[in-house]
Amino acid sequence: MNTSRILTLFLAIGLSLSAHAQRISQTINSNWSFYKGDIKDINTINPEIKWEAVNIPHTWNSQDVTDDEPDYYRGPGWYKRKVFIPHEWQHKDVYLFFEGAAQVTNAFVNGKPLGSHIGSYTFFSFPVSKYLKFDNKENSENEILIKVDNSHNEDIPPLSADFTFFGGLYRDVHLIAVNKVRFDMDNNASSGIFITTPKVTAQTAEVNIKGAFVNNTLADKSLIVSHQILDHLGIKKYEISHKYKAAKGRKIDFSSDIKNIDKPNLWSTETPYLYRVISTIKDNNTGEIMDQITNPLGFRWFNFDAEKGFFLNGKPVKLIGASRHQDYKDRGNALTDALHIRDVELIKEMGGNFLRIAHYPQDPAVLQACDRLGILTSVETPIVNRITETEAFAENSKKMHLEMMRQCFNHPSLIIWAYMNEVLLRPRYEKGTAEQETYFNRITKLAQELEELTRKEDPYRYTMIPNHGNFELYKRVQLTKIPQLVGWNLYQGWYSNSFSSFANYLDRHRKELSDKPLLVTEYGADADVRLHSFDPIRFDKTTEYATMYHQAYLKAMMDRPFVAAAMIWNLADFNSETRTETTPHINSKGILTLDRKVKDGYRFYQANLLSKAYIQIGSKEWDLRTGIAKSESNLTNTQIIQVFSNQARVTLKHNGKVIDTKDTHQGMATFSVDFIDGKNTLQAIANSTENNTEILDQTDIQFNLLPVNLKSQTLPFKEINISLGDKRYFHDMENHQIWFPEKEYQPGSWGYIGGSIFSMENKARHSYGSDIDILGTNADPIYATQRVGIKQFKFDVPEGDYELTLHFAELLSDIKREELVYNLNGGTVTGGDFQDRIFDVKINKSIFLENLSNREYLEPEKAVEFKTRITISDKNGITLDFTPKKGETILNGIQLRRIR
Ligand code: GCB
């Protein structure tokens, strides 16, 4: 670096330091006291109340969403803490600024109410100066008290959605002290400055900077308001300034243009070149800087074309990325900035270029990271599934939307304002009725109002509504007409039909809505990382089915240039309290787990999108496998291994020996590996064409090889875990155990005799067992499948001591439940099918469980296990007899372990 550059950098840093001297903004996240419950009168707070020490970000739901109990706390919570206000702040305007709190917030300073804010996801602030107490000390003690309430409220969106409505002070809280001469602090908690780039080409650009400032002093002032554009090194490139006579108590609007910006460095997904705009207010007489704010600036132009897709700076760019919830394992929505930023990095590391900030505006760190990393974004107002037909609901929606727009306005990564998500999913009235028509008209009207508001606020970005796959309905209600872009959330081959209907849907849009750009705003399939199958089918929740789904979808979208965007649902698994299924309370459509561990879905996109040489062995986390040996003399079991790579050819080695070299298709190559008992080392290798180097990935897999004949001498039997009514492998990561799918008994081996796989009536779309939450276990997949009417289970084991465990769960119950609406099953009711069941289980003719009844031990929907020790001293092995006395017999899981 030469000295002049060092000097300029130094000056730039100096500049931003002086900014801090003007405006003080500090988080007050530590040392809060929290009380879950209500306080009726803040003047007579019960001294007995148990306050809990917490830090912010905080939600009171982080634990109660993971327990066995349905529902989670929705109600009031109170926070309090002391703040120590410096003496000099007497002469300043002080604000309490919230990055977000869920969902209605009332704040008090020293017992005085500041006001309230409605909505969980936008920032808000309150001026507090007039409530602060100052004594003669350097710092004066003041108390902040905050009530947050996440109770359901029909007038506040979102009303219903497939995610958990966590409550609390879950984002940063700041104290901000500004001079009385300052930029506007009272514009919807925005920066008060709004930057647009009305014209951008590779040759030239124009910037407009709008905003307002106030003179809250008791004297008229002569002020200079200037805006400097700094490049990414902090070097000043442009400056514009105006002189103002600001009468005392006045607020003054400004709008400044900087034209003829020569050859701007363009912001793109590959090179997200960021400029900064530093806006300053200076006292014209004293030269003192009164206030200063920095905003990001990026020069880019973009357009959506209904036929050709999306263009950034004149070049076609297929938008590929994911939606993301602000949600993390054990934390609920109370994430640190680092975790928010990490998600954006994960999209980048996947090779993605888009983040749909769904279904609501998120932490400021998210858009900052998108600007910096070159991830284009959309952001949306959380009107999800349905509306309420009240003026209050409409007003709250519009207010939220306006807040969101003003707060996110200056981020160059943001290109789409969205509102409403699948808002016709839950029409409140019966089909075809006049009430339903009125309801639809109300939705159309609200959409029109939001559309108008958006276009007026920002003519430079696009508008969008993401719809669910009911083409006719959204067209009829005009939701495909009102916004500029149409988003479709499509799940063919998951909730319905087959993969091919996805492609047909896209083609239908092209034909019938030929002037509307199309974005696939959602698509995805649940993948429980513990479940695997070599014959995956819809709704089995296996990693393998999800990979097939993503393969089919990505291909269909890549083949169609008119599809502007592919947004995976979802970047990561997320909490959704009402979901049950294999991972209760969690929607597992993430391509990452709740704690951001990689699933194959993520590897698939890396292999397809990254340009840097990439290779990864698929399903590495399935590092404990099982299978049956081919014969007594061939002690191997062949299983498929998928390798993900962006290279043309890959080689797989098994325990040091080359198995094969194969061409990749869609970033994947499939190998058959002859696993041996014990440790198996796999190495996937490719020669990177980039710089002719070898890239490699390696993993170890522990294989529990099972003998064909349980009396085998060469491979003595050790243990087996079998999930009945199941065709999948279940990798119990908590207990480090692997469960085998059921098989029919064959002499010499093991298996069931008689019965059929449990399947629920009305549940054709659920291919496996039940999707109720089985209480008392995390191994729901084992308990949710079952063999009904089983007669016997046999193990032809040699003599010895064994531990045998039987697992049951009664899947029929009296409790009626409406199918989850997201399962698009039109409100089908399940449950209410309880029948008496009593049966005996004998082990080698001796009674083990007598009169096992679903009115006693076998309580519906609960995991029940019985363990016993057996000594076998003859050649007949183990035979379990199941004898029905009332209803049919059942068995969900069985484990056998050799002790001696
Ligand atoms: C949707 C919703 C989203 C759900 C998703 C799912 O269409 O927009 O909120 O989470 O489907 O997983 O069913």
Image: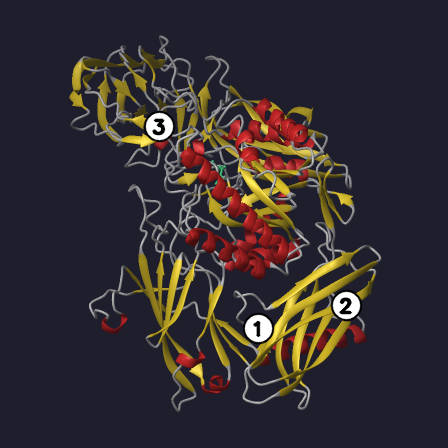
Tell me which numbered mark, 1 or 3, is placed earlier along the sequence: 1
Q: Nearer the viewer, mark 3 or mark 2?
A: 2
Q: Nearer the viewer, residue 157 or 621?
A: 157
Label 3 residue SS: helix
Quarter of the image for residue 875 reads top left
Quarter of the image for residue 120 reads bottom left
Q: Residues within 10 Å of mark 1 (few under 14, many from 20)?
A: many
Q: Nearer the viewer, residue 584 or 632?
A: 584
Residue 21, given in percent of the width and then of the height, sits at 58, 81
Residue 751, given in percent of the width and then of the height, sits at 35, 14
Label 2 residue SS: strand
Q: Is residue 530 visible?
A: no
- Name the colour scheme: secondary structure
| Residue on which disc 1 sits | 184
Tag 1 near tag 2, CB within 8 Å: no
| Residue on which disc 3 sits | 782
Q: Amino acid at mark 3?
A: Ile
Q: Identify the residue shown where x is 48% and y is 84%.
A: 89
Residue 29, given in percent of the width and then of the height, sits at 43, 67
Tell me which numbered mark, 3 or 2, is placed earlier along the sequence: 2
Judge whether 656 appears above or below 166 on screen.
above
Q: Nearer the viewer, mark 1 or mark 3?
A: 1
| Residue on which disc 2 sits | 258
Mark 1–mark 2 Cα distance, whole angstroms, equals 21 Å
